[in-house]
Amino acid sequence: MCLGIPGKIIEINESIGVKMAKIDFGGVIREACIEAIPEAEIGDYTIIHAGFALSILSEAEALDTLSLLEEISDFNSELNIDTSEL
Amino acid sequence: MIHQNFDFSRSFRNPQLVQGVVAEIKKTISRPWTLMEICGGQTHAIMQYGLDQILPAEVELVHGPGCPVCVTPLDQIDRAHAIAQLPNVIFCSFGDMLRVPGSTTDLFMLRAQGAQVRIVYSPLDAVKIAQENPDKDVVFFAIGFETTVPVNAASVLQAKALGLKNYSILVSQVTVPPAMHAILGSPANRVQAFLAAGHVCAVMGFWQYHTIASQYKVPIVITGFEPLDLLQGILKTIQQLEGGKFIVENAYSRIVSEQGNITAQQMISQVFEPCDRNWRGIGLIPMSGLGLKSEFAQYNAENRFQVDHIQTQEPEICIAGEILQGLSKPHQCLAFGTLCTPDHPLGAPMVSSEGACAAYYRFGGLNAEELGK
Ligand code: SF4
């Protein structure tokens, strides 16, 4: 239930009491509350849990992590571990 | 600005990188270590992607208490059932809760018998139902960890802003750090390091974890939910354990910062305050709950509906409490897969999408264990 799904903000609306937005989850559009990410702009990615945005996703951090993992992976590529079960 | 087509989820499932990180874990590890993933969502991801089967045998993953449906105390579930049966009530809940067995029934059965039970995706949907049904009492079952508490708070704040008099919440909210203290402080504890729950930390940050790491000398690594997130979290904990370190590290930096989401934290503290809380199967953990502040008492379903004389009864065979503390695994329960299945659950971990028993049942953890892992 603590699962969060990344989606992209495509429209921001004021609704009574809370700030809402339309979020695009890879083609599926849903409403979510963005009250807790007041700095969010259209085009930002966010992580949505139970119709509520938890934080803005940092692309720079995502790319950093991936390049770190790529380094580890390149370094180990000669080891040939079997992950075919995946 | 974000690239137009960056697919965050898929990038963190890249099989080649998975292979590389698993190789690095194998290279790093020299002896057995027991790690606990706190969040039940992580338990499911681990089983779903078969990560437990590709990790070296020295890594033992035990499953933590991070399943809100599982730890909601039985008396509160029985209270939910009693309220849902009241004539003028529309009872709203996350879908996971419907099959959770109380002492005598479950919400699914009550709905079949005519109670107005509705599944909602968000408590804000329940507020909308309250708006559309001014002559009904709409109650939302506000369970959850720190991830869900802000949206529960938002629903109360919105109901207040709308001037709704017919919306209330039945609260069973819990927080992670007191549970980590309870697990590590237990004489039976086996946990040597934690994969901390990424989305709890998205809200709360991880500044509170430094004292836990140093007090109990356990590495704590903030971990996400995709295969590469989980493997990176495991790699970082193993590196610390092998190197004799015990610090807090962040392996989910695209979502989580040290201070967390301050606005969300303010929403929590505006509406809720810490209180003692019972965890189903585990017992009372001091100051591990978040209850409504007195100024929001009118939104408290426990005040609004008098449903006392609750007499709880747990099935004796269910060892959910041990499983939630990492002391046992689901297949060690005598009822697992026989008396207890997702269609006929005896305990909450068999029905919740975050319950360890459901994960083992669905993804064949039993087989992995039989294979000698
Ligand atoms: S298998 Fe069923 S009875 Fe056994 S611990 Fe899990 S939920 Fe309880």
Image (cartoon, coloured by chain):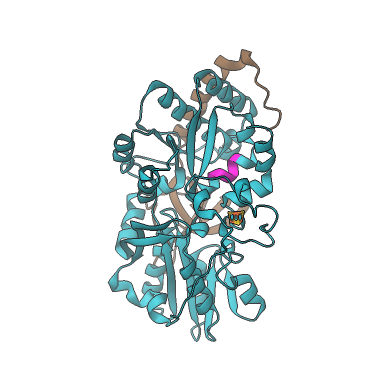
Q: Which chain is brown?
A: A
What's drawn in magenta, residue-wise? B42-46
Q: Is residue B363 left or right of residue B256?
A: right
Colour chain B appears in:
cyan
Location of residue B168 in the rendering, given as x and y in whole percent from the top left corner: 43, 75
- The correct choice, above or below, for B133 with respect to A36 in the image is below
Ligand 1 shows up in the quarter that is bottom right
Total marks placed: 0
The image shows residue B296 at horizontal and vertical percentages of: 32, 72
Say which of B24 and B182 sits in front: B182
Say if residue A21 shows up in the picture: no
Q: Identify the residue at image location x=68%, y=23%.
A: A82
Q: Is residue B23 magenta?
A: no
Nearer to the camera, B35 or B7: B35
Image location of residue A36, percent across then percent down: 39, 54
Majority secondary structure in the magenta region: helix
Location of residue B341 (image quadrant): bottom right
Task: Please tell me which residue lies in front, B306 or A37.
Answer: B306
Residue B303 place in picture, x, y as percent = 37, 79
Drawn side of residue B219 relative to residue A50, left or right? left
Q: Residue at x 68, y 37 (%)?
A: B370
Measuring 43% from the left and 22% from the top, which residue is drawn there? B242
> Which quadrant of the structure image shows residue B231?
top right
Depicted B12 relative to depicted B296: above or below: above
**Residue at 47% over, 62% down:** B72
Using the rendered image of the protein, determine whether residue B197 is visible from the camera's viewpoint.
Answer: yes
The stretch drawn in magenta includes residue B45: yes
Q: Residue furthest top?
A: A78
Quadrant for the C terminus of chain B, please.
top right
